[in-house]
Image (cartoon, rainbow, N blue to C red):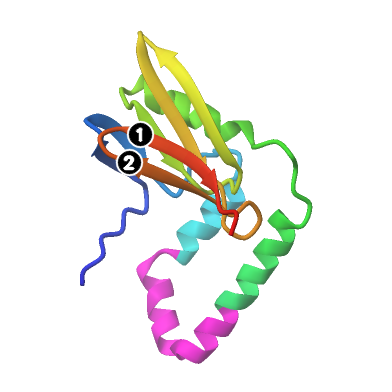
Amino acid sequence: MAVEVYPDGNEERLGGKRAFIAHGDLSNPKLWRYRAFRRILKNRWTYQIIQFAGPHLSRRIAQRLSDMSYQKYHTDISPNPPPAFKAFAHMKFLEGFEIVILGHSHYPEEIEESIDGKRCLYFNVGDWMTHRSFLRFTPPGRFKLSQYEG
């Protein structure tokens, strides 16, 4: 089965509306260190080094980087979502998108905004580890940000 990956996000039609869906890691311009790291990590030279190193070493390095990231960004969780994601969604609304779905901030969030008389929706699906949050889409156009209670 082929999987399509859109590292910069992608435009979709959801319920007949123009939607922008992305991981959201590029939506905060203040995270320039992350952007530089991402650029280093996602290039053909790095992929070749990973192939050369083999799965065992690559997996250990990836786990170490993941642990460091988790300690830096998830141990002292602020109760408020970063405002950069809402600002990013607003800019997308001005580009004509009616729905923006992101996930990178790890804060479940739902914002409704009116732009030129159009109802615009921004969702951040949050995360599974802390908030156990997810976004449910029920066609033709119903969205529900939920939290798993089980």
**Which quarter of the rendering shows the N terminus?**
bottom left
Residue 25 visible, this angle:
no
Residue 136 visible, this angle:
yes
Disc 2 residue type (three-letter): Thr
Compared to 97, does 149 lie above or below?
Answer: below
Query: Is residue 25 inside the magenta stretch?
Result: no
Q: Position of residue 139 (x, y in %)?
A: 27, 39
Q: Which residue is mark 2?
A: 138
Q: Residues within 10 Å of mark 2 (few under 14, many from 20)?
A: few
Q: Which residue is mark 1?
A: 142
Q: Position of residue 100 (x, y in %)?
A: 40, 34
Q: Position of residue 78 (x, y in %)?
A: 75, 42
Q: Which mark is residue 54?
A: none
Q: Residue at x 54, y 29 (%)?
A: 86
Per the rendered image, the range of residues in magenta is 42-61
**Which quarter of the rendering shows the C terminus?**
bottom right
Disc 1 residue type (three-letter): Arg
Q: Residue at x 46, y 58 (%)?
A: 39
Q: CA distance from mark 1 to mark 2?
A: 5 Å
Q: Main secondary structure of the magenta part?
A: helix
